[in-house]
Image (cartoon, rainbow, N blue to C red):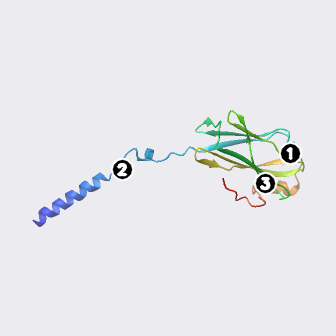
């Protein structure tokens, strides 16, 4: 009787473990993220009259109506910080933003964009006029010195 019970127990455990086998398509049952990408294009000679352009793509397709696209600009030395402002939808996946910057120096632009559950915040440095020695050093270090509190939520 003990041997029969022993064999039945082993058979039951093998059956139970066999039922726990991983399905081949298990990964497809989970949410597949499709990351959002932003291409930030600055005007050649920044004067503020030409727009800053942000082109959004997701799954290699243009994003014509993003959930949100906000732009934030600050100066490297901390003397200027423009809070987040909404970019204008120019169509065909291009979002534009105008900002007049009168002082020469190194600036940073951060785009806050979201679409279909994917949120990105790329940051890009750009120059207005002539750069100081400190600006060139900061640019070479690639360490954006953000000023102020950037803990705003969407």
Image coords of residue 154 (percent x, y): 66, 53
Q: Secondary structure at mark 3?
A: helix
Residue under label 3: 140
Residue under label 1: 100
- Residue at the far left: name it: 1
From the image, state whether disc 1 or disc 3 is nearer to you: 1
Q: Looking at the image, tell me whether mark 2 or mark 1 is earlier in sequence order.
A: 2
Image coords of residue 70 (percent x, y): 72, 47
Name above or below for residue 126 compared with residue 96: below
> Which residue is drawn at the image coordinates 21% and 57% (left, top)?
12
Give the Cα separation between the discs numbered 1 and 3: 25 Å
Q: Looking at the image, tell me whether mark 2 or mark 3 is earlier in sequence order.
A: 2
Mark 2 burial class by Cα count in 10 Å: few <14, some 14-19, many 20+: few
> Which residue is drawn at the image coordinates 65% and 41% (left, top)?
66
Most foreground residue, 62 or 85: 85
> Which residue is drawn at the image coordinates 12% and 64% (left, top)?
3
From the image, state whether disc 2 or disc 3 is nearer to you: 2
Q: Quadrant of the N terminus?
A: bottom left
Mark 3 burial class by Cα count in 10 Å: few <14, some 14-19, many 20+: few
Image coords of residue 112 (percent x, y): 69, 49
Q: Secondary structure at mark 1?
A: loop
Most foreground residue, 106 or 92: 92
Give the Cα separation between the discs numbered 2 and 3: 50 Å
Residue under label 2: 22
- Location of residue 94 (image quadrant): top right
Give the Cα separation between the discs numbered 2 and 1: 58 Å
Q: Looking at the image, tell me whether mark 1 or mark 3 is earlier in sequence order.
A: 1
């Amino acid at each position: 009787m003990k041997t029969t019970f022993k064999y039945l127990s082993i058979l039951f455990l093998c059956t139970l473990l066999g039922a726990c086998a991983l399905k081949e398509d298990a990964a497809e049952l989970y949410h597949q993220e499709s990351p959002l990408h932003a291409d930030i294009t600055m005007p050649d000679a920044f004067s503020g009259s030409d727009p800053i352009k942000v082109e959004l793509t997701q799954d290699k397709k243009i994003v014509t109506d993003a959930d949100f696209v906000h732009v934030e600009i600050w100066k490297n030395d901390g003397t200027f910080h423009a809070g987040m402002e909404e970019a204008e939808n120019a169509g065909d996946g291009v979002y534009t933003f105008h900002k007049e910057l009168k002082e020469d120096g190194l600036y940073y632009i951060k785009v806050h964009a979201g679409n279909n559950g994917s949120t990105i915040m790329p940051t890009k440095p750009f120059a207005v006029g002539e750069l100081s020695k400190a600006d060139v050093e900061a640019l070479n270090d690639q360490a954006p010195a953000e000023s102020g509190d950037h803990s705003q939520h969407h």
